Image: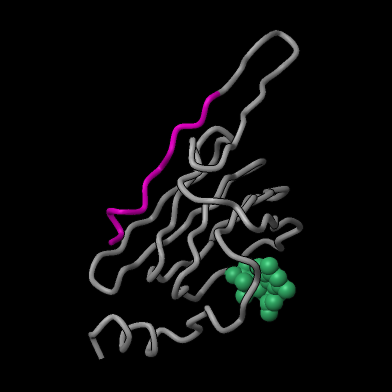
Amino acid sequence: KVYDCCLVHLPKVHNRAGNITTLENNVNVPFDVKRVYYLYDVPGGADRGGHSHIELQQFIVALSGAFDVLIDDGVNKKVVHLDRPYFGLHIVPGIWRELINFSSGAVCLVLASHPYSEADYIRTYDKFKQLRGFS
Ligand code: TYD
């Protein structure tokens, strides 16, 4: 399942006045985007995430700065370093994730497949392991 979480190389239109990267539903973002949010002003040493989702798919881009995304399917773990605005990480449902090591000024863009729903969150690692069948 961790191996279903792909790093997507996004298109970049480059000229001397800078770059443009586009995100399009079902073209380079592999689902229909229903919600967009971004994390910023993350204090040094703070960690975010620390949960999993039942149905939600997400697509994460480091718009500015850098951070690490730890992804864990209950068996395999992987750490993905995001530090370029032309790479996106697709996170499939059922993955425990932690966002760590934010650089100062980092902006983390998140595209989500559903509106916000607290009912879709699994907020403890024990519950996550239980649902994945490893209790
Ligand atoms: P959460 O997803 O737990 O943050 P993170 O994974 O980045 O640490 O969200 C933190 C709080 O923000 C949560 O209690 C409710 C609120 N929230 C919304 O109201 N809408 C949203 O779309 C998101 C992502 C969070």
Residue at x 66%, y 24% (from the top left corner): 20
Q: Residue at x 67, y 21 (%)?
A: 19
Q: Is residue 52 left or right of residue 94?
A: right
Q: Position of residue 17 (x, y in %)?
A: 75, 12
Q: Residue furthest top?
A: 16
The reply to whether residue 10 is in sight is yes
> Residue 39 falls in which quadrant of the image?
bottom right
Label count reads: 0
Q: Position of residue 95 (x, y in %)?
A: 39, 68
Q: Is residue 46 visible?
A: no
**Residue name at image x 70 percent, y 55 percent:** 38
The correct choice, above or below, for 17 with respect to 108 in the image is above
Could you tell me which quadrant the C terminus lies in?
bottom left
Identify the residue at horizontal 51%, vertical 45% (top origin): 82
Which stretch appears magenta?
1-11
Quadrant of the picture in which ligand 1 is shown: bottom right
- Left or right, 18 with respect to 119, comes to right
User: Would you say residue 5 sits in the magenta stretch?
Assistant: yes
Colour mode?
one colour
Residue 30 sits above or below residue 110 on the image: above
Quadrant holding the N terminus: bottom left
Q: Is residue 39 left or right of residue 84?
A: right
In the image, 25 versus 120, the foreground residue is 25
Residue 106, percent from left and from top: 67, 48
Per the image, is 52 magenta?
Answer: no
